[in-house]
Image (cartoon, grey):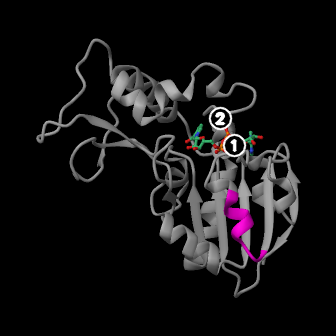
Amino acid sequence: MIEISSTDRVFILTGAGISAESGIPTFRGAGGLWRNYRFEEVASPRAWQRDPRLVWEFYSMRRRIAAAAKPNPGHLALATLEGRLRNRLFLCTQNVDNLHEQAGSRGAIHMHGELFKSRCDACRLAPFDDTSTYEPPAEILRCECGGRIRPHICWFGEVPYRIDEIFHALDECTLFVAIGTSGVVEPAASFVAHVRARTFYVGPEEPANELAFTKCFLGNAGDVLPNLFRF
Ligand code: NAD
C-alpha cells in the first residue's frame, strides 16, 4: 500500500507495460515489438528520410492494434486517482496510445507523442487528429506547404514533448510512482533519480533502475493498481 496524505503531490510515470494487459505489445520483453522490428528502421528521423512508407506501415500497424484496445483496471485506477487528487496528480506517459483518455484521465502528458495524431515534417502546422492507416502503394500525404505528413511521435534522437513542465512537476512532487517501464529509455529512466521524495515501481519484474526506488510492487498493473493507494 502507498499512503497518500492530503498535501501530497503525486507524479505518475507510465510505460508500455500498463497497456500490455489491454493487448498492446510492449517494446521489450516477451512479445515485444522490437523482436520483429529494428527501431533504427522505423522510429528515427533517419528512417523517415530513408523510407517513409516503411515508417507509415509500422505506425499504421500500431494504430490498428491500439484502435481495438480498451483500458484495463490499471488505467481505470489512475483515472479514479486523478478524480480524487485533481491538480495534485501529474500523469506523464511514455505511451502513445489513448487508453488513459479512454479510461477517463483528462490531464495525461504524452511525452513521446500520440499515435492518433499526425503533423507536417516541415512547417509548424499543429498536430491534428488522424486515425487513418497507410495502405501501400498509397502516396505519403502532403501538407499545403509541400512537407510530408508524419506521425506525431517523438522518435529516437528527437526531444520529448513538454519536458520543462515535466521537470517542474518532478521538482514539486512528494511521491513518485513509475508503472510498467523498463527503466532503460531516457530521459524517463532518469526521472526517479531526480526526485527527492518517496519513489515506487509497479510491474511484473524489477526495472533496470530498480535501485533508485524506495520499493517495487511486483505484479501486473491491472492487479496491483486498483488496491495500491490509501488515503
Ligand atoms: P518497454 O517495452 O521498454 O518495457 C515494458 C515494461 O513493462 C517492462 O519492464 C515489463 O516488465 C513491463 N510490463 C509488462 N507487462 C506489464 C504489466 N501487465 N503491468 C505492468 N508492467 C508490465 O517500455 P517503456 O519502458 O515504456 O519504454 C519504451 C518505449 O515504448 C516508450 O518510448 C513508449 O513510447 C513506447 N511504447 C509505447 C506503447 C504504447 O503506447 N502502448 C507500446 C510499446 C512501446
Query: In the depicted view, which residue is nearer to us: 98 or 149?
Result: 149
151 in relation to 37, above or below: below
Element type at marker 1? Answer: helix
Q: Position of residue 98 (x, y in %)?
A: 49, 47
Q: Position of residue 30 (x, y in %)?
A: 75, 26
Q: Quadrant of residue 49?
A: top left
Q: Quadrant of ligand 1?
A: top right
Element type at marker 2? Answer: loop
Q: Position of residue 46 (x, y in %)?
A: 41, 31
Query: Furthest residue to the top?
Result: 137
* Chain part drawn in magenta: 190-197
Say left or right for 156 vs 222.
left
Residue density around tag 2, few if under 14, some if 14–19, many if 20 or more, within 10 Å: many
What is the magenta segment's predominant secondary structure? helix
Q: Is mark 2 within 8 Å of ligand 1?
A: yes
Q: Which numbered dot is residue 26?
A: 2
Report which residue position mark 1 lands on: 17
